[in-house]
Amino acid sequence: MPHWTIHLFRKGLRLHDNPTLLAALESSEVVYPVYILDRKFLMSAMNMGTLRWHFLLQSLEDLQRNLTKLGSCLLVIQGEYESVLRDHVKKWNITQVTLDAEIEPFYKEMERTIQVLGGEMGFDVLSLMGHTLYDIRRILDMNGGTPPLTYKRFLHILSVLGDPDMPVRNLTAEDFQRCKPPPELCLAECYRVPLPEDLEIPRESQSPWRGGETEGLQRLEQHLKNQGWIANFTKPKTIPNSLLPSTTGLSPYFSLGCLSVRSFFYRLSNIYAQSKNHSLPPVSLQGQLLWREFFYTVASATPNFTKMAGNPICLQINWYQDAERLHKWRMAQTGFPWIDAIMTQLHQEGWIHHLARHAVACFLTRGDLWISWEEGMKVFEEMLLDADYSINAGNWMWLSASAFFHQYTRIFCPVRFGKRTDPEGQYIRKYLPVLTNFPSKYIYEPWTAPEEAQKQAGCIIGQDYPLPMINHKEASDRNLQLMKQVREEQYGTAQLTREPRADTKMQICICDH
Ligand code: FAD
């Protein structure tokens, strides 16, 4: 008997390479495409700032439009997910719920609850992996049931597994023809995508990035036209302070599943196949997708992955608790223009370059302030459009040298790092207009400018823009000793995520101690 199905979108907000939705359509007489907007669940799973709320709503609107074009619609239902499902399973005589399998503990918990509900109410649950290149469980199995803890080991496992599955075909109007939900439902006001004001989300703060599959695909196609750039992409050579993204800028779209990583992976493979030479992991574009996959794999099987306490791969560090300093970092008030410009871009746009993330994360943790990576991770979680449970925590552990990264003597200098690729400080001038008129000579360390120069620039340091909150040289020397001591004391933990040879990921480090 064909099913009456609710397809529950969680991430995976797309119609291309959507294996679960395809399976739903192939096994059903009627499919109700549903997004449950459970604010309590969403906010408890990961704190979500205004910019990401806008991005989510735009992505839902786009999905709604694209489903309508194919003769279906998106039914957005606000409320607590369990009771919403219970009500609608009964109301619509549902026999199957389909959803993408996810690795985050909160999504796994949701799936377990739905399974139990299915047992109780008599519906089937079908969940397939669509958010990663591989079914992560296969990687774990191949590694003996535990995650490979180094990128090299991870690549080795993948080489045994072979290429990821090919993307499934795009969905068409014919797929939806047979499975239309009743048309009056699609028109019902109560199922529309809410407006920002319905959710009391201020309209004025919006990122220049627009959410949705359509926008994501446009950006993707634009990049793929530039085959030379794709083939030669070398991550450490991309520029953190260019005024437009120097990398793909696709992360917000991957994060919500508006874009399929498998589709991107195979489009890259096609370009590589036509190129004489191309870059390779870890620095190539496919290499970036594999970093994503790596962090998903480790996160999926590491207890307390987003915390220090109870996390077996993470060094246990006695970080300072300093709310005032944390606040200055968060609010772009450190007095280091390079750091403050990055944090301002993060506030205004919700996206910053990977190496810019390096700069501010190192500054907060092992570089200058010695404040826990968990605090930084929470700020990123709130502000980033691409905020992701596994990747965010994994990279914060990396940057704070709590796991994965071992060249801890390399500390980014908050003055020299940015100067290398933007000596005139155009990026700082854009995001910190108060410093616009400073001569380039002083733009990265305006406190060194003579009083006359400050007056001429119309900005007195200590009055119109803060003095540096810390002496970088003294702080980083002290922190280095602390880190050395921690690593000696916790040698076993430090070795867990260490490659046999030196790290190969980022060779771009500015100030070696
Ligand atoms: P590209 O260089 O074009 O790479 C293509 C894709 O590969 C990205 O969209 C992303 O999906 C993946 N990718 C790239 N770099 C990494 C990486 N280092 N680790 C894992 N996947 C990667 N990325 C997130 O998507 N969400 C986060 O919450 C997040 N938090 C981070 C926190 C810190 C402290 C740091 C240092 C990095 C973080 N990153 C995060 C990783 C990385 O900075 C972003 O993925 C990247 O900058 C996104 O820009 P892009 O799409 O142009 O990347």
Image (cartoon, rainbow, N blue to C red):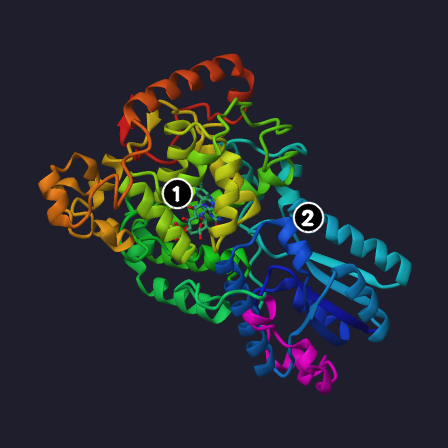
Is label 2's Cβ within 8 Å of ligand 1?
no
Q: Residue at x 57, y 64 (%)?
A: 17
Say whether residue 78 is left or right of residue 360: right
Give the residue type that dot 2 points to: Phe
Q: Name the quadrant containing residue 218.
A: bottom left
Which region shows up in magenta?
A: 171-199
Tell me which numbered mark, 2 or 1, is placed earlier along the sequence. 2
Q: Residue 380: horizontal and vertical position, in percent?
A: 48, 46
Q: Residue 442: horizontal and vertical position, in percent?
A: 15, 40
Dot 1 falls on a residue whose secondary structure is: helix
Residue 344 can be seen in this image: yes
Q: Eyeballing the image, is 507 above or below 124?
A: above
Is label 1's Cβ within 8 Å of ligand 1?
yes
Question: Residue 338 magenta-drawn?
Answer: no
Say whether residue 103 is left or right of residue 196: right
Closer to us: 83 or 299: 83
Residue 151 can be seen in this image: no
Dot 2 falls on a residue whose secondary structure is: helix
Location of the C terminus by quadrant is: top left
Give residue 106's mark: 2
Q: Residue 156: horizontal and vertical position, in percent?
A: 52, 35
Q: Residue at x 68, y 48 (%)?
A: 106
Q: Eyeballing the image, is 296 above or below 250?
A: above
Closer to us: 483 or 131: 483
Q: Residue 453: horizontal and vertical position, in percent?
A: 10, 43
Disc 1 target residue: 357
Q: Residue at x 11, y 37 (%)?
A: 450
Q: Eyeballing the image, is 371 above or below 456?
A: above
Give residue 308's mark: none
Give the residue type that dot 1 points to: Arg
